Image (cartoon, rainbow, N blue to C red):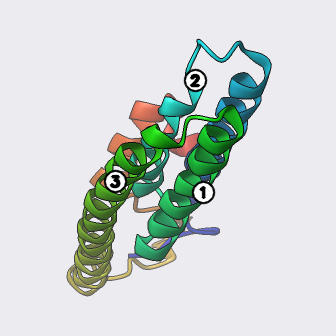
Amino acid sequence: MHAAGPRPRPATGTRTQFNLGRALPVLVMVLVVVADLITPDADRVDRLLITVPALAAATWGVYGTIGMGLVAMALRALLVVARGEPEDLLASEGLILGITAASAWVSAVRTRNERDLAEVTAVADVVQRVVLRPLPPRLGHAELHLLYVAALLVARTEEAGTPPASR
């Protein structure tokens, strides 16, 4: 496999989406606290804090997910106590704790699957490099400028709407 020039890089949009995904639980916490403070006591916006650990499980690791769940629990407790309704505190904290535990498990499974996929991808890349021998830079009097692009990369760039040749 002979490539003229640098290897294709992954799409930059995936990095931006990843960072937005990691910021989403924090953004939800901020928005819920602000909304709960500016709305009347009859409108209970603080209940939306139960979504924070589930959102964190999509992009954060196990400890990050647990941390987000604990911060959500603390914020919910502060909002309930500030409102003067501590009788609602135990049930809501238990619910957030249960969702945090389930989300931490989901995060562990997701992390393990991502690690397995990375290992399989690395092995496939090595196998492709072994099987596809490098092509000569010249064929007779003609100079060759060749680039091998894996089918998976072609499929990903087509999904993103970018032709592989422009990458």
Q: Is residue 27 left or right of residue 109?
A: right
Q: Position of residue 37 (x, y in %)?
A: 76, 27
Say which mark, if any, is on residue 74.
1
- Report the residue marked by disc 3: 94
- Eyeballing the image, is 73 above or below 88? below
Residue appearing at x 40%, y 43% in the figure: 92
Tag 1–tag 2 contact (CB < 8 Å): no
Between 160 and 14, the one lying in front of the other is 14
Q: Position of residue 160 (x, y in %)?
A: 48, 33
Distance from the alpha carbon under mark 2 to that under mark 3: 18 Å
Which amino acid, mark 3? Gly
Q: Quadrant of residue 155?
A: top left
Q: Earlier in the sequence, mark 1 or mark 3?
A: 1
The 10 Å Cα crowd at callout 1, few under 14, some 14 to 19, many 20 or more, is few
The 10 Å Cα crowd at callout 2, few under 14, some 14 to 19, many 20 or more, is some
Residue appearing at x 33%, y 66% in the figure: 104
Q: Is residue 120 left or right of residue 150?
A: left
- Report the residue marked by disc 2: 45
Which amino acid, mark 2? Val
Q: Is residue 151 left or right of residue 131?
A: right
Distance from the alpha carbon under mark 1 to that under mark 2: 15 Å
